[in-house]
């Protein structure tokens, strides 16, 4: 069996929903388990409505009603008989409005209440999708994810209890799929042992799908979205970006950590650890290109596989002559970061200085005060990290030289080869990041000069 996860962009309107249904119809011989996000923009709308209710804003309920109204319109257009689904959507809408009235009355929005509100978006999506599949005569079971995805009680960022998920998935999902029934359930949503609704955080639908794929021993996890796989760069920045056919799990994790938006950094890890191939595909181009992340394959050295960028970040340069030949100095320095709960990304050291990048919301004033007597701190704001990722990158001759040559006249403020063999990070000004990405992509992904002519000659020789 396979797990098919459809993101919000794949459920945005009637056309995309029908395309997703067609994909399930084509895969029914593999008994898919379907994991759905909320329809596009629904989660954002519900979160905005909840925030407005906390401020007792007059339009809070209207904001919440909009995605439910859209779902009813889609149901009417997509189903031969939409009365039952429309009634269910109206019931879910009323549940949300009751919660929002409570928030407005108390002027308080807890994380637990927020989870209870936004989870309704996924429930609407699965109700509609299940009805569409049943319209095609399929045997479908709609499963409430809260009956399977057991989590702790850190509302808004819940952590799954994987052993319990395995037990519940075998009992509630495997029995259905063994009988040939398709199971449709929600991503992003779970529940505590006491039955309180939780969410796994943004990007949690991929995580839900990976958890279920691992628990069910699926042969493949398919993530259906609005791009043809993981691209060689962000297409909004680099028009020439193209799909990367194959990535190692480590490459995918590095790209996600440095800003690639198709995959959330840790979400596919359960599937990878279980040895399950993950494919990232375009819902409207099912026969187009896609990316495979297969932990069972050996990945040879190949240089730059893809680029990613993240920003803004802040560069901190800490200088002190006490650092020279002083055992334990860096430990004392970064203990201050830990005490202030400041996460560090890139670190580069020299004889009497250390430079690192931190997020823009780091408490810099507190950090500078805490480091008095230990180091002088220089702060460079509005920077960005551009990362080149690929297996064996550090062993590929000339990579740094090619990157710096391609960037000219942009001068990187920091250059770091990661603590592994597959990452090279360059820090540039935030205003330069788009141009830096385009220059690096042209350097590492454009065909060599004369390649087209060579291909034409080769074709002519064989014709």
Image (tube, rainbow, N blue to C red):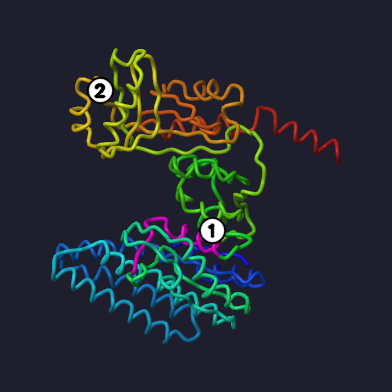
Q: Determine contact: label 2, label 1, CB under 8 Å.
A: no
The disc label shown at residue 223, or none: 1
Which quadrant is home to the C terminus?
top right
**Eye-nearest disc, 2 or 1:** 2
Q: Residue 321, percent across and down?
A: 29, 12
Q: Quadrant of residue 250 in the image?
A: top right
Classify mark 2: helix, strand or loop: strand
Residue drawn at (23%, 73%), measured in percent from left and top?
Answer: 99
In the rendered image, the vertical position of residue 345 relative to residue 290, given as above or below: above
What residue did someone put label 2 on?
377
Question: Considering the numbered disc 1 on the image, is that residue within a helix, a strand or a loop?
Answer: strand
Residue 75 falls left or right of residue 441: left
Q: Which residues are magenta?
A: 197-215
Q: CA distance from mark 2 to mark 1?
A: 44 Å
Side (left or right) of 63 relative to 162: left
Q: State the image quarter where residue 28 is shown.
A: bottom right
| First of labels 2, 1 by sequence position | 1
Q: Main secondary structure of the magenta part?
A: helix
Of all residues, the one furthest to the front in this rendering is: 327
Magenta stretch: residue 220 in it?
no
* Residue 69 locus on image (x, y percent): 34, 75
Res. 27 visible in picture? yes
What residue is shown at x 36% (from left), y 59% (from top)?
Answer: 158
Percent position of residue 368, x then y: 21, 27
> Relative to 21, does residue 330 appear above or below in the rendering?
above
Residue 350 lies left or right of residue 31; in this view the side is left
Residue 456 tag number:
none
Judge the density around disc 2: few (<14), some (14-19), many (≥20) Cα neighbours within 10 Å.
some
């Amino acid at each position: 069996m396979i797990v098919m996860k459809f993101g919000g962009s794949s459920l945005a309107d009637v056309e995309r929903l029908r395309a997703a249904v067609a994909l399930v119809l084509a895969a029914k011989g593999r008994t898919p388990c379907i994991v759905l996000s909320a329809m596009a923009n629904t989660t954002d709308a519900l979160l905005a409505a909840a925030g407005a209710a906390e401020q007792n804003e007059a339009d809070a309920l209207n904001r919440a009603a909009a995605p439910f109204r859209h779902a009813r319109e889609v149901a009417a257009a997509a189903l031969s008989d939409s009365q039952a689904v429309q009634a269910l959507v109206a019931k879910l809408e009323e549940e949300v409005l009751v919660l929002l009235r409570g928030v407005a009355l108390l002027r308080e929005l807890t994380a637990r209440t927020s989870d209870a509100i936004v989870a309704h978006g996924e429930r609407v999506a699965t109700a509609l999708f299940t009805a569409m599949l049943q319209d095609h005569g399929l045997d479908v079971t709609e499963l409430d994810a809260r009956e399977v995805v057991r989590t702790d009680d850190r509302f808004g960022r819940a952590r799954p209890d994987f052993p319990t998920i395995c037990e519940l998935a075998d009992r509630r999902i495997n029995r259905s799929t063994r009988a040939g029934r398709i199971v449709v359930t929600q991503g992003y949503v779970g529940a505590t042992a006491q039955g309180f609704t939780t969410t796994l955080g943004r990007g949690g639908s991929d995580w839900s799908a990976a958890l279920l794929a691992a628990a069910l021993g699926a042969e493949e996890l398919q993530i259906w979205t609005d791009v043809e796989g993981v691209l060689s760069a962000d297409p909004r920045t680099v028009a020439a970006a193209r799909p990367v056919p194959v990535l190692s799990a480590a490459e995918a994790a590095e790209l996600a950590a440095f800003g690639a938006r198709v995959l959330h950094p840790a979400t596919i890890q359960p599937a990878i650890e279980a040895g399950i191939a993950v494919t990232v595909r375009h819902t409207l181009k099912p026969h187009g290109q896609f990316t495979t992340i297969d932990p069972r394959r050996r990945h040879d050295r190949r240089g730059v596989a893809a680029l990613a960028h993240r920003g803004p970040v802040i560069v901190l340069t800490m200088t002190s002559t006490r650092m020279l030949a002083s055992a334990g100095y860096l430990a004392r320095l970064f203990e201050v970061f830990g005490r202030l709960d400041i996460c560090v990304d890139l670190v580069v050291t020299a004889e009497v200085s250390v430079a690192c990048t931190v997020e823009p919301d780091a408490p810099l004033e507190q950090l500078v005060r805490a480091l008095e007597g230990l180091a002088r701190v220089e702060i460079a704001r509005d920077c960005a990290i551009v990362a080149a990722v690929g297996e064996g990158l550090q062993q590929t001759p000339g990579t740094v030289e090619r990157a710096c040559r391609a960037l000219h006249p942009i001068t990187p403020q920091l250059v770091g080869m990661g603590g592994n063999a597959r990452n090279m990070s360059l820090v540039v000004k935030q205003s330069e990041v788009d141009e830096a990405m385009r220059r690096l992509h042209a350097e590492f992904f454009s065909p060599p000069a004369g390649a087209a002519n060579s291909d034409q000659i080769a074709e002519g020789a064989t014709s």
